[in-house]
C-alpha cells in the first residue's frame, strides 16, 4: 500500500504512522486523514504489530486543519461537500467516525508530539492512548469537531484555556493529565520508542482487554455519547461563525482567529 501524505513503516513490533507534510506543518487535509485511517487499520490487522506510534515529520506535530493548501483546494473541488448536509457528513466521517475508530483500535497507541499541536493536532493526539510530548510542545484547543477537551484536562481547566483561547505548554498539559510524559526535544523519539517497546513486551490479549475495559469505563461516563452530541453544537457554532465572518467582511472588519489570540497571549506572557 502506497502513501503520499504519511510515512508508514514497521520497526519490529512497533508500527510508525508519521504525518509527512512538514512544508505545511503537517496540516490535515482530507487525503492525509484518509491515509492515516488506512495505515491504522493496516497496523491493527498486522499480527506482528503490538504498538502503534503516531508522530509528525519536521518541527511541528500538526498545525491543525488544512485550510487552503493546493492539495486541500484540489480535493475540495474534486469532492465538494454540498450544502449543510454535505458539510455535516464530511465532518462526521473525517472526525467523529475516524476519531472514535482510532481511539478504539485493539492495540495500544502513542502520540509523539513536538512543536505546535493545534486544533486538529489536538484531536488526533487525544484519540491515542498515551501522549509523550517534547518540552517545546504548545497545545491549542478550541470547540472543534472531536471535542474531547473536557475529558482531556477536566471541565475547569477546559473552560480556563478555551475562554482565554491560549496555549497550554507541555508541562501544564502534563499536570492537567493530557500528557503522560514530557521529555527534552532531542530525546523525544528515543523515550517514546522505549515506552512503546516496553508495552510491546506485554501479552497482546492482555493489552486489548485492559484498553477495552478502560475505554468502556470512560464510555460509561458518557465519553462517546458526549462527543457525538458535541459535534452538533460544533456545527451550530461553525455556521454562526461563518455568518459573522461574512457580515464583518462586508464592513471591512477582521475577526482575530483563536491562533492570533493565542500568539498575542504568548507575546504578552513573555513581555
Image (tube, grey):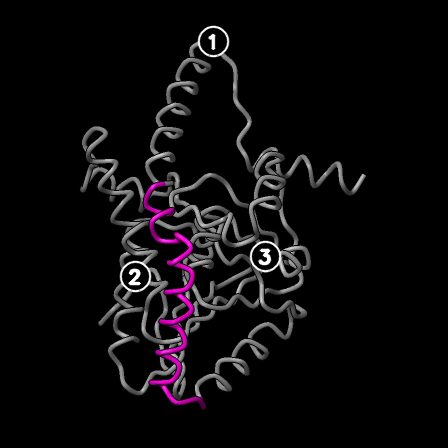
Q: What element carries label 2?
A: helix
Name the residue nearer the viewer: 72 or 153.
153
Q: Residues within 10 Å of mark 3 (few under 14, many from 20)?
A: many
Q: Residue at label 2? A: 101
- Image height of 183 relative to 86, above or below: below
Residue 47 lies, in percent from the top left, at 27, 85
Give the magenta part as a residue range: 201-229
Name the residue nearer the viewer: 175 or 22.
175
Residue 261 lies, in percent from the top left, at 61, 33
Residue 147 lies, in percent from the top left, at 43, 46
Q: Left or right: 190 with respect to 29? A: right
Please give the name of the residue rendered at 29% of the width and 50% of the height, measured from the top-left corner. Answer: 94
Question: Most extreme residue toward the front, as rendered?
Answer: 220
- Image height of 146 relative to 248, above or below: below
| Residue 115 numbered tag | 3
Residue contact at pointers 2 and 3, CB within 8 angstroms: no
- Image height of 179 relative to 13, above or below: above
Q: Residue at label 1? A: 251
Residue 209 is one of the magenta-drawn residues: yes
Residue 198 is one of the magenta-drawn residues: no
Amino acid at each position: 500500500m502506497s502513501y503520499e501524505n504519511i510515512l508508514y513503516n514497521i520497526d519490529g513490533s512497533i508500527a510508525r504512522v508519521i504525518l509527512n507534510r512538514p512544508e505545511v506543518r503537517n496540516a490535515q487535509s482530507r487525503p492525509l486523514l484518509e491515509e492515516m485511517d488506512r495505515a491504522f487499520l493496516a497496523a491493527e490487522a498486522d499480527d506482528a504489530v503490538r504498538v502503534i506510534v503516531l508522530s509528525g515529520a519536521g518541527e511541528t506535530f500538526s498545525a491543525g486543519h488544512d485550510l487552503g493548501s493546493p492539495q486541500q483546494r484540489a480535493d475540495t473541488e474534486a469532492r465538494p461537500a454540498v450544502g449543510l448536509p454535505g458539510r455535516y457528513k464530511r465532518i462526521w466521517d473525517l472526525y467523529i467516525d475516524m476519531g472514535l475508530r482510532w481511539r478504539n483500535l485493539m492495540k495500544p497507541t502513542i502520540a509523539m508530539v513536538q512543536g505546535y499541536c493545534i486544533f486538529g493536532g489536538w484531536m488526533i493526539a487525544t484519540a491515542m492512548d498515551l501522549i509523550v510530548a517534547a518540552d517545546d510542545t504548545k497545545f491549542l484547543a478550541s470547540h472543534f469537531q472531536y471535542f474531547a477537551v473536557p475529558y482531556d484536562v477536566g471541565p475547569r481547566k477546559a473552560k480556563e484555556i478555551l475562554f482565554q483561547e491560549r496555549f497550554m505548554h507541555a508541562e501544564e498539559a502534563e499536570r492537567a493529565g493530557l500528557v503522560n510524559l514530557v521529555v527534552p526535544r532531542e530525546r523525544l523519539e528515543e523515550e517514546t520508542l522505549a515506552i512503546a517497546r516496553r508495552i510491546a513486551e506485554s501479552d497482546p490479549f492482555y493489552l486489548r482487554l485492559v484498553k477495552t475495559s478502560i475505554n468502556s469505563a470512560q464510555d460509561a461516563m458518557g465519553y462517546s455519547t458526549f462527543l457525538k452530541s458535541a459535534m452538533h453544537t460544533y456545527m451550530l457554532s461553525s455556521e454562526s461563525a461563518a455568518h459573522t465572518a461574512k457580515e464583518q467582511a462586508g464592513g471591512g472588519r477582521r475577526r482575530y482567529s483563536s491562533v492570533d489570540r493565542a500568539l498575542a497571549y504568548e507575546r504578552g506572557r513573555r513581555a
